[in-house]
Amino acid sequence: MKPIYLILIMLLLSGIASAQLEPDRERFDIEIHPGEVIHKVLTLTNTGEEPVSRIRTTAVGGDAKDMIMIDIPKKAIDPGDDMDVDIFFMAPPETKPGLYTGFFYIFDETAPPALPIAISFNLNVIEKDSYNVGLYINDAKEVSGEVTPDEPVEFDLEVRNTGRFRDLIEVYIPEVPAGWQPRLYDGDEEIDLPYSLALPSGSSHHLTLKVEVNENARSGSMRIVGESQGNRSKNASVTVNLDVGVVVKGYDVRIDIPK
């Protein structure tokens, strides 16, 4: 390899290591009614060693571009600090029901710049029914993560009443993979499943899902369901995909070496 290419590669690697943005999620699945506005927050963390002086984005692409507004603060992010990005989803009253998609890229102004981050959106525009349920995990319908017996994984679970009337929505897990121990929290209180929430029309409630695994657990998937009690045919579900890692326990080795 020529020296000039080696130098360029080293500079690029050092740039990526020194300043790097990490989003708390890269996908948003939104169910929205015509005439409705929904606000979400994307959190960016500087996981590098240098401040990020400014963040730039591309224009939103896709057929949902006119339904998404992004507000990024014009400020620096120090190493280890976070910055919240406000995202507004707007469906004009004349919007036809259907699935609309969008995306944009985030860049940080470092020298050399780090790799861009892609954020994608799936907007499902639906007519408001008498009873309906929205269920999201980290603002999406499906999430993936890694877990070990020593380190549980945690997700935000949003339960939303997307119907016209006040409803009682029951949250439950149909089947739990062997070795997984899901725990659901409402605030700081651990709650039993199934769990019922009384929600007015258009309102939502956030729960915390923590998943622990034992040493015999294997990688797999788990589904969480939210079901309307006003009309049990109306339900929604989300999926958690987990890669189960192995804990390597430390031990001391004594070696007797002859003189």
Image (tube, rainbow, N blue to C red):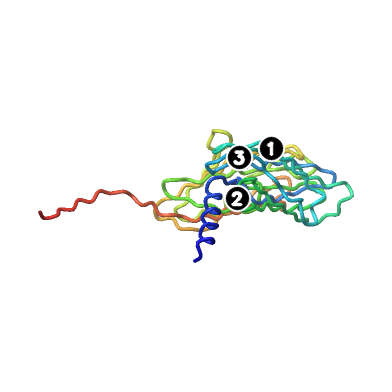
Of the two numbered discs 1 and 2 on the same chain, state the one appearing first in sequence: 2
Place of residue 220 in the rendered image (x, y in percent of width and height, measured from the top left): 51, 58
- Residue tagged by mark 3? 207
Q: Residues within 10 Å of mark 1 (few under 14, many from 20)?
A: some
C-alpha gap between disc 1 and disc 3: 14 Å
- Residue tagged by mark 2? 112
Place of residue 171 in the rendered image (x, y in percent of width and height, measured from the top left): 62, 45
* Left or right of 163 on screen, residue 10: left
- Residue tagged by mark 1? 198
Q: Which is nearer the eye, 256 or 175?
A: 256
Give the residue at the far front of this rendering.
Answer: 3
Of the two numbered discs 3 and 2 on the same chain, state the one appearing first in sequence: 2
Residue at point 10%, 54% (across, down)? 259
Q: Residues within 10 Å of mark 3 (few under 14, many from 20)?
A: some
Type of the residue with mark 3: Leu
Of the two numbered discs 1 and 3 on the same chain, state the one appearing first in sequence: 1
- Element carrying mark 1: strand
Give the residue at the far bottom of this rendering.
Answer: 1
The reply to whether callout 1 and callout 3 are in contact (CB within 8 Å) is no
Of circles 1 and 3, the one toward us is: 3
